[in-house]
Structure formats: C-alpha cells, structure tokens
Image (cartoon, grey):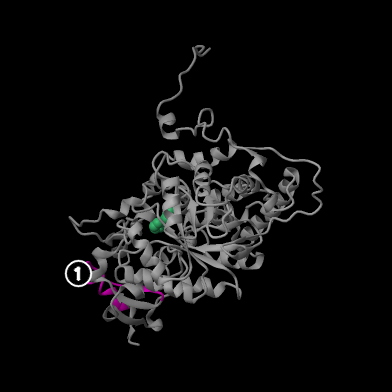
Amino acid sequence: MTLVSSAAVAEHASRDSCWIVVHGKVYDVTDFLDEHPGGSKIILKYAGADATEAYEPIHPPNAITDNLPTDKHIGAIDPNTVVKVVKEVTEEDKRRQALLDARPPLDEIINLHDFEAVAKAVLPPKAWAYYSSASDDEITIRENRAAFQRVWFRPRILRDVTSVDWSTTILGQKSSLPVYISATALGKLGHPDGELNLTRAAGKHGVIQMIPTLASCSFDEILDAAVPGQPLFLQLYVNRDREITKKYVQHAEKRGVKALFITVDAPQLGRREKDMRMKFVGDAGAKVQEGQKDIKQDQGVARAISSFIDPSLSWKDIPWFRSITNMHIILKGVSTPEDALLAYDAGLQGIVLSNHGGRQLDTARSGLENLPPIIAALKTRGPWPNPNFSVFIDGGVRRATDVLKALAMGASAVGIGRGFLYAFASYGQEGVEKSFQILREEFEMNLRLLGARNLSELTPDMVDASGLHQHVGLTPADNLFNTTYQPLRLAEFRDA
Ligand code: 173
C-alpha cells in the first residue's frame, strides 16, 4: 500500500481537495463532502489531518471503507512522518476524570436508577444529551414510567415459594432473565468499548442482546466478542438501498443471529431537542465556505446519521424480508391491535410494543398500555400464549416489578435499552453484570412476594390493570410549558 506523508495529507485541507486520515489510512473525501449524512462541516474541520477521534464513536470501523470508492483510498499514513501530538487535556477531560474517580463503588449501586444518576454525572454532556433525549415535550418518555405505576399487584399467599425460577425462553433461545438487551445506538459515546460491554456481560450471564444497526462497534466485532453459541438478535434499520440491507441481513444470519427486529416506528427520526441543542458538530474552527448548504449539523447526533433509513418501507415489503432470510422476523414499534393483527396475519413471529423509548411520536401511548387490547385482539386468532407469536414490550423498564406486570398481562419478555446502556456508560462491563445481578435479586424477591414460583405461574389475575387507561392523576408533567408558565403564587409578605 502507498505510504503517504503527513505533509502530503496536509496539502489537501480545503473543500476543493479534502483528504483525511482515519485509523492510519488516508482517504480523499472531496466528492463525499456533500453526501456525508452528518454534513460537510465536521469533515472539513479535519481536512488535511487525522479525524479518527471524531470519527470513532459515531461510525462503525468499516463505514468509511464501505462508502468510499476504492480509488479514493489513497494509502496508509507514513508512521515516520506522524508527529505525535500529546493530546491536550482539557478542563472538561479533567472534570470528567475527577468524576469517574469519585464514582460510588459498584457495591453501593442498588438499583437501575443509580446507574442513570452516575451516567448523567460522568458522561460528556453531548453523550448524555443524545442518550437521554426524547421527542418534542418528552411526554411519552415520562408516561412510559408512569404507566407501570397505574398497574397494581394482586399477590397470592401460602404457595411454598422456597425455590423460584425466573428463567425463560425467548424466540426459542434460553435466557436467564425474562429480559433482553434492547438496541441502543452509538455505544462508544458512553464508553470506549461501546456495545462490547453488553456482549461480554450477556455472554457470561445468559442474557440475549439485540445488536443495533447503528452500533459504534462493527457487527463482526460484536459477533467476535460473543462466546460460542451465545444467542444474539439484530435490530434493523432498513436502508433505501435494499441490496445493502439484504447483504447485512444475510451476513447476520450466516453468523448465527437468531432473530431480526425490524424497526417500524422511525420512518423519520423524532426531534430530540436536548440532542439538537447540543449541536453535536464541533463547529469552532471549521473551514466552512460561504453559502455552503449545511443544514444537518444542528439536528443532533441521531438525525445527522439517520438519512439512510427508508421512509417508503411498507407492509408490501414483508414478503421480501421473508424471502431473504429464515431468521425469526419481529416488528419493533407496534402500537395498535390493527397493526398487531396485520403482523400476525403476515406470518411474522412477533412484535415489540414500543414507542422507541419516547424518542419518536410524542404523546404516543406506552407499550404497557397498548398490551391488553393487543393481547385481546390476538386471542381472536387462537389461544394465548401462542408458541408461534411473541409480544414484547419495552420503554421505561427499570424494575423487576415492571417486567412481572408485563408478563402477567401476556407479554413474552421485556426489553431494556437505556437501563443497560447507563450501566456500561457508568461502570463498563462490570456495571452491566451488576445490573443483571440487581434484576436477579429483584425477580427472586418479587416472585416470592407475588406467590409465583416460575413465570408460567404469573397470571393475569395477579395484576389489577383497571386504572391503566386512566391518565388522570399520573399524567406526566409538561416540563417546558411548566417552566415557562410559572405556577400562580400566593400573596407574599414584603421584605422586612
Ligand atoms: O433512537 C435513536 O437515536 C435511533 O434509533 C437512531 C436512529 C438513527 C441513527 C442513530 C440513532
């Protein structure tokens, strides 16, 4: 491979000729500038220089090699010409390191909310904004939690609960928990090992991970980190270019992935305003030209990299998916009995009642609230549970009690996304392992207290969901409006 000196790269530092270095390789990205989903400005910031550090958290390693024609691969950077720049330690780096050093010891973390609080404190502000944000007024993300509080238990007593078992089977795969790791994008924004933290912890503890299409680690890196026989699922964003999707899906199947979760609630990405306000592109110092159309950079991380998602996806595409893979196919992001029945009648293997963690249509109902009418609709097609069709829910799950409510109401298993993401963002793989241990302890105690020795003994009569559809009283607070329109105040005393 041609060796290119740093000085030669530095000569191509403009919009007319733009070379960058990523992972030691030199690329000519001049013609790609306007096609970059994240806009040209961010690339131009690194024109003539090494862009690896900015590239790494938001692209899988092979993104650049796959997207640039080979004649734009200029060569390898000549290591003898690279001046080792000692990375400047910023005030922000120091603050972050001090916070990491001062984290509560892991054995003081006693529930999944604790990870969230630690992650909020230690994550770079842009990462926290991206992970925690939800769409518009963020009503749905809060409703996801509130809905669980509207379901109450009806525990049974005196059932000899000496030994209890919360293991299960999810889409034919053994799982030590009735919970799977739901897909969340861009793991390296939270931790240098990104999604591998989840893969390694999941492999060790018999938990199933759903790999995100937009992981920071490449699909193969994740598969290579799995132990032999470790079951994995794949979340799929469908590309406008179906050949890309086909190749991806068939590669996943070849590598042993067991199920394909097609995301169907994101034909366009929701506006996550916390993320947008962060303007993830560091614009300081960008070599931008006058009048350049560069509208994407203020849309937040996710929108910047989501333009490949095909909004034309429709029910007509389902037979095509069936024709390209034998994996189980599940639709992720179903909200109504109408669509649940369409999925069932289309011969799919399941659905996830999800509102994408409150990140898509704001004021969409929670998965939990959608569960009873959807189970009722599916019962018109035959007995429930149905071994050939699974109903999962996700959104706002932080406690084993949340999971047990969903299972009692007919769900097959429950997905947790942010909960595990925050566990590794705050403590790496160990954090994820600890989160499994916390859930195990919660399942053990709560199954005993409910009078169920295993998951098949969880029955609909163990919950009172009669208030689930009543939004009065537990309506999520409208935070932005409430902040602007201060509450009325009573007569005040004058200052003495
Ligand atoms: O919720 C998300 O942020 C998400 O699903 C996504 C979609 C496209 C790109 C990055 C993330």
**Quarter holding ligand 1:** bottom left
* Nearer to the camera, 45 or 407: 407
Is residue 50 visible in the rendered image? The answer is no
From this view, report whether residue 474 is shown above or below residue 378. above
Please state the extent of the stretch shown in magenta in the rendering.
Answer: 7-23
User: Which amino acid is tagged 1?
Assistant: Asp
* Nearer to the camera, 429 or 260: 260
* Nearer to the camera, 482 or 240: 240
* Nearer to the camera, 81 or 225: 225
- Residue placed under numbered mark 1 in the picture: 16
Q: Is residue 12 magenta?
A: yes
Residue at (36, 82) in percent of width and height: 76
Secondary-structure class at tag 1: loop
Residue at (20, 59) in percent of width and height: 289
Residue at (43, 25) in percent of width and height: 486
From this view, report whether residue 413 is shown above or below residue 251. above
Locate residue 85, reporting x and y percent.
Answer: 43, 71
Q: Residue furthest left?
A: 291
Is residue 425 visible in the rendered image? The answer is yes
Locate residue 99, reporting x and y percent.
Answer: 58, 52
